Image: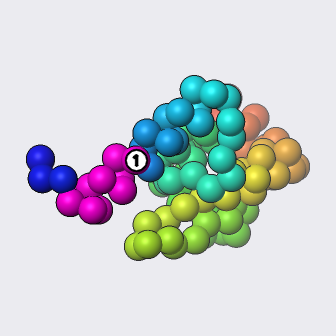
Amino acid sequence: MELTPETLRALIQEAVREALAEAGASQRWLTLREACRYARVSKNTLRRLIDEGYITAKRLDGKWIVDRLSIDAFYGSEAGFIARVVERML
């Protein structure tokens, strides 16, 4: 693997994310994959929730990042409660 500045940046970012996760620190902005794991939903479900305005996301450097606080708010809301109940029934 060639060690370009972009590759090095990605490796460092991933190492920092892993270190924060191991330390129990929560970051506010998550990648789509991290947000799916955090919210315990599929990528399609997360994208639908974003499209419908329930969860906040934006593009940064060409990649989508998701606001963890908006996931927390959604699951703390009535709509989020209903979504959790429905998920458990399926």
Q: Quadrant of the C terminus?
A: top right
Q: Is residue 60 visible?
A: yes
Magenta stretch: residue 8 in it?
A: yes
Identify which residue is drawn at 51% across, 72% down: 59
Residue 24 sits above or below residue 3 on the image = above
Which SS type dominates the magenta stretch? helix
Residue range in magenta is 4-12
Q: Is residue 87 left or right of residue 2?
A: right
Quarter where residue 56 is shown: bottom right
Q: Position of residue 72 (x, y in %)?
A: 77, 47
Indicate the colouring scheme: rainbow
Q: Is residue 40 visible?
A: no
Quarter where residue 9 is shown: bottom left
**Camera-side residue of 23 and 59:** 23
Q: Position of residue 19 (x, y in %)?
A: 53, 33
Q: Is residue 68 left or right of residue 30?
A: right
Q: Which residue is mark 1?
A: 12
Identify which residue is drawn at 27% across, 62% down: 5
Magenta stretch: residue 46 in it?
A: no
Residue 50 sits above or below residue 13 on the image = below
Residue situated furthest left in the rendering: 1
**Camera-side residue of 24 and 44:** 24
Q: Secondary structure at mark 1?
A: helix
**Camera-side residue of 21 and 57:** 21
Q: Is residue 18 left or right of residue 2?
A: right
Identify which residue is drawn at 76% across, 53% down: 69
> Given the image, on which type of amino acid does mark 1 rest?
Ile
Residue 25 sits above or below residue 49 on the image = above
Identify which residue is drawn at 57% across, 26% down: 22
Q: Position of residue 20 (x, y in %)?
A: 59, 36
Q: Position of residue 10 (x, y in %)?
A: 35, 53
Near mark 1 (Cα within 10 A), the count class, few <14, some 14-19 or many ≥20, is: few
